[in-house]
Image (cartoon, coloured by chain):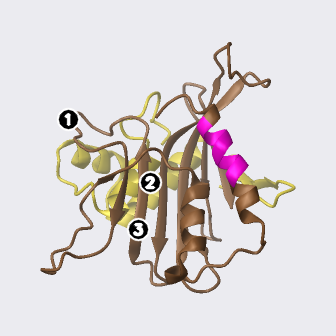
Amino acid sequence: MSLVHIPSADEQELFLLSRVDADQNLIPIELFGTNRLFLQQVIRVVDDEPGPGALETGKRCQTVSYRYRLEEPDRTPLIRWEYDREPPRENYPYPRAHVHVHARFSDDEDIERLHISTDRVALELVRWHLLTEDYWGVESKVDDWVEVFQPSIDGFIERRTFP
Amino acid sequence: MNATHTTEAGTVVYEPTQEEYAAYLDRIVWDAMGRSVADFKQAYEDGELDETNTVVGDLIALLRIGQEGDSSSA
């Protein structure tokens, strides 16, 4: 994975987290040579508000946006988890966190344009889905991944200050 | 945009200048859409782009369109 410290004219602390190839294109992670997981997350570091739940560092990371996407090897999307902290435009009608499923109704109509509402999803839950559904054929490198993910998910829920 | 260092966990860190990052975004948007960043933003504002398209959605997030604060460098 790569971290790009985004230079900001107004001195915000911003970072782009993704995987970057030699030509600096954003590329997905291979999942044991089968499907791919594309990750693109923009993070902002802000001063923490004093009070209950405040972190000792006095700083807090905010997710500005994420794009988590399960893809086929040719990069055809299968499932897209998306979030924008603020609506990207006026009168944006969709939930800020949503999922797109690249599937079809029984009459063959594509449903990938549907914005299926979600809460903001921790990346660990995306990986949880990939690891538990045999359909994707994804395996963990460690056996105790639940014990690793669960505290992280709990911390995500405990620390977040914004939906 | 050159990598500046690698963390203990193996994460490669880049620290581009504003000019480097602006050029990087210009290249990414041009490669994906055949437009400049400014043209992309204008086209999105004008409702000309399909925001449910995967590529468009990625760029909206990458450019921080609609998000709080400065986006001139993104």
Label for residue A91?
Answer: 1
Callout 1: SS: loop
Of residues A7 and A108, the one drawn nearer to the viewer in this rendering: A108
Label for residue B26?
Answer: 2
Identify the residue under disc 3.
A79
Residue under the image location 42 percent in, 53 percent down: A82
Q: Amino acid at mark 1?
A: Asn
Label for residue B21?
Answer: none
A55 with respect to A75 (left or right): right
Residue A51 image offset from top left, x and y in percent: 67, 13
The chain painted yellow is B
Residue under the image location 70 percent in, 21 percent down: A54
- The Cα atoms of the two marked residues, 1 and 3, are separated by 25 Å
Indicate yes or no whether the magenta region holds residue A15.
Answer: no
Query: The residue marked by circle 2 belongs to what chain?
Result: B
Of residues A117 and A2, the one drawn nearer to the viewer in this rendering: A117
